[in-house]
Image (tube, rainbow, N blue to C red):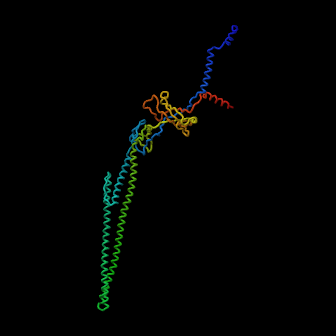
Amino acid sequence: MVGAFQKDTEAIQNAPDPFLARVTLHLLGLFVIGLIAWATLSYLDKIVVAQGKIVSTEANVMVQPLEMAVIKKMLVREGDVVRKGQTLATLDPTFTQADVQQLESRLAAADAQIARLRAEHDGKPYTVTEDRYGYGTLQHALWRERQAQYTSQMQNFEEKLARLQSNVAKYEMDRQHLNERLKVVREIETMRSTLLASQVGSRLNLLQATSDRIDIERNLVLNQNELQGNRHDLQALLAERDVFIQQWNGKIIEELTTQSNEREALREQLIKARKRQSLVQLDAPTDAIVLEVSPKAAVGSIAKEAEPLFTLVPVGATMEVEASIDARDLAFVQVGDKVRVKLEAYPYLQHGALDGEVATISEDSFTSKDDQARSLFYRVRVKLLTTSLENVPSNFRLIPGMPLAADIKVGERRIITYFLRPILRGVDESLREP
């Protein structure tokens, strides 16, 4: 009854709330409370995103010439897959081949000379060893000439020795005869002296006997002098012959030692020269992919010593990720953190992602040369736990240099902190304003 006399506005104000509005309001309140509870109790992964690329655990192989040479052939291009031992390029072998031939010639000459010297030292005939350079024939001719020289010299010594030995024998025999005559003459002289004393013989006969004795004694003295002189000459000639033989053999041994050392040095040089000759073919040291060919590597151009001509990436090497993280995120990233690797060439929503974990973190920071701000970053190596993707060709494989994004899971964070942290930071900063 009272409502009938109220105004329309008062009637509206006093009217009860619509049921639907009350339900909606309660639902909104419950939703806000539930949202706050969910944000408080739920967690999200904390992710540090790092840009990087696929790298090989094995270093790239640089193929380069040992010394300066002219490039003769180029047999591969960038992107080619090569096998171990496959020839990549060939260099002009003129210089190395000439060195090898020269050393082979010198070594053959040394071998022939050593064989000749050993034959001379051992007193055996020299056997010619055939070689393409003809050094054996030359050494045989030299051996015959030296043998003739040695034989002639020895014959000369033998003739002189024989003459002196004959003289010594003659003087010794003459001395024996003179001693016998002296004995007889002395007896004659004694007998004539006795006869003269008995006044039977003449003084003239005594003087004649004395004169004969004196002549024989003088001849004995002369004979002794000649005998000693010839004996001295004989000993001197024997010594001279021995010195000649020793000097001859000593010179042979000296030359043999010198040539043996020279031969060993030539062998070492020849090994090096043949190694250099083999390196005129630049071969792949392992199964690899040709990553880069030097722009200077053209037929007819000169390859400088130790200048890389080819850069090879080993095939079959374990791949991993090298990524750069901002220096401000270093405190969050730890070794062993899980990583999700997304290859830019293969969208992860279609092909999936690779799994990995942080293996190493660089001990020092780096700066990019292209970054004007010179921002600091650290390098992270990620060990890949999986290397396959979905919906990719059968020949798919990871190639060094593939760009990627690495999502590093560094922990969890309550969802509500995403809303409260900006507010708390703003309040904290505002309270510090003057």
Query: In the rendering, at what x and y percent does residue 338 appear?
Result: 53, 33
Instruction: Decide: is 361 above or below 264.
Output: above
Image quarter (top left, top right, bottom left or bottom right) of the N terminus:
top right
Task: Identify the residue at image location x=30%, y=70%.
Answer: 162
Task: Identify the residue at image location x=48%, y=38%.
Answer: 57
Instruction: Decide: is 296 above or below 23.
Output: below
Query: In the rendering, at what x and y percent does residue 113 appear?
Result: 35, 56
Query: In the rendering, at what x and y percent does residue 371 appear?
Result: 55, 35
Task: Identify the residue at image location x=37%, y=49%.
Answer: 100
Q: Where, by quadrant of the figure, is residue 408 drawn?
A: top right
Image quarter (top left, top right, bottom left or bottom right) of the C terminus:
top right
Residue lying furthest bottom in this view?
199
Left-right relation of 303 to 158: right
One can see residue 373 in this view: no
> Observer-nearest residue: 202 or 132?
202
Q: Where, by quadrant of the figure, is residue 72 drawn?
A: top left
